[in-house]
Image (spheres, rainbow, N blue to C red):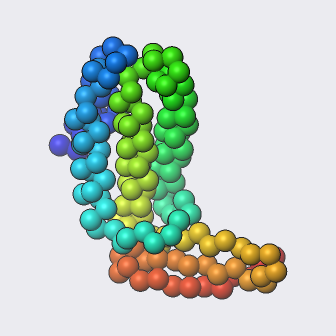
Amino acid sequence: DAKDEIDKVKTPKFNPDGIGGGFHHEHIDNLEDWIDDLTDSLPELTSFILPTGSSTSAQLHVARCICRRAERRVIPLVVTEGASDPNILQYLNRLSDFLFTAARWANYCEGMEEIQYKRFYRGDTQRNRVTVNLRNKSTNKHETRRT
C-alpha cells in the first residue's frame, strides 16, 4: 500500500544510541530500491537539470532542498559531537536523491519537459535552451534571446 510506504519514509523506526545501531539500514535500502524503480521509466541524465515542471515536482524539489539543509546541519552532530547515529547522514542523502528522482518522475507522469542547465558564456548573444521530453526521451534545442 502506497500510504504505508510513505509512512515509512516519514517516520522510520529509530532508537538513538549514538553509535550506528539505532537507525536501521533497511530504510536506506528501501529508498535505494524506490529510486531504482522510479529511474527505470526516466531518460538517463546527461547534464544538470533546472528544477522546473509541475506543481508536484516543484514541491518535491523544495522538500529536497530542506532535506539537504537538514543533512548539512546533522553533520556536526555526527562527526564532531558523536551525538547522532551516523546512518542518519546516509539516510538523509538517499532521501534527498529520492525526492529529486520523484520530482523527475512527477514531471514524467504529467507529461512535462525537463530543461537542461546550459552555462551562459560572456560574449554570447543568445542562450541555448535544451529541453528533454520525458515521455519519448527526445531532446529539443531552442534559442532564447537574452534581454
Give how far across and how far down residue 44 sits, in percent: 37, 70
User: Residue drawn at (35%, 65%), measured in percent from left and top?
Assistant: 109
User: Residue drawn at (34%, 18%), measured in percent from left and top?
Assistant: 19
Query: Residue 11's quadrant in the figure?
Result: top left
Rendered position, 27 above or below 38: above
Give how far across and how far down residue 108 sits, in percent: 37, 67
As drawn, is 94 to the left or to the right of 124?
Answer: left
User: Residue drawn at (24%, 57%), measured in percent from left and top?
Assistant: 37
Q: How many dots with numbers?
A: 0
As drawn, is 147 to the left or to the right of 25?
Answer: right
Rendered position, 138 above or below 31: below
Residue 106 visible in image: no
The quarter in which the C terminus is drawn is bottom right
Residue 71 visible in image: yes
The quarter in which the N terminus is drawn is top left
Query: Residue 73's quadrant in the figure?
Result: top right
Query: Residue 6's quadrant in the figure?
Result: top left
As drawn, is 144 to the left or to the right of 9?
Answer: right
Give how far across and how far down residue 28 sits, in percent: 29, 39
User: Residue drawn at (42%, 33%), measured in percent from left and top?
Assistant: 89
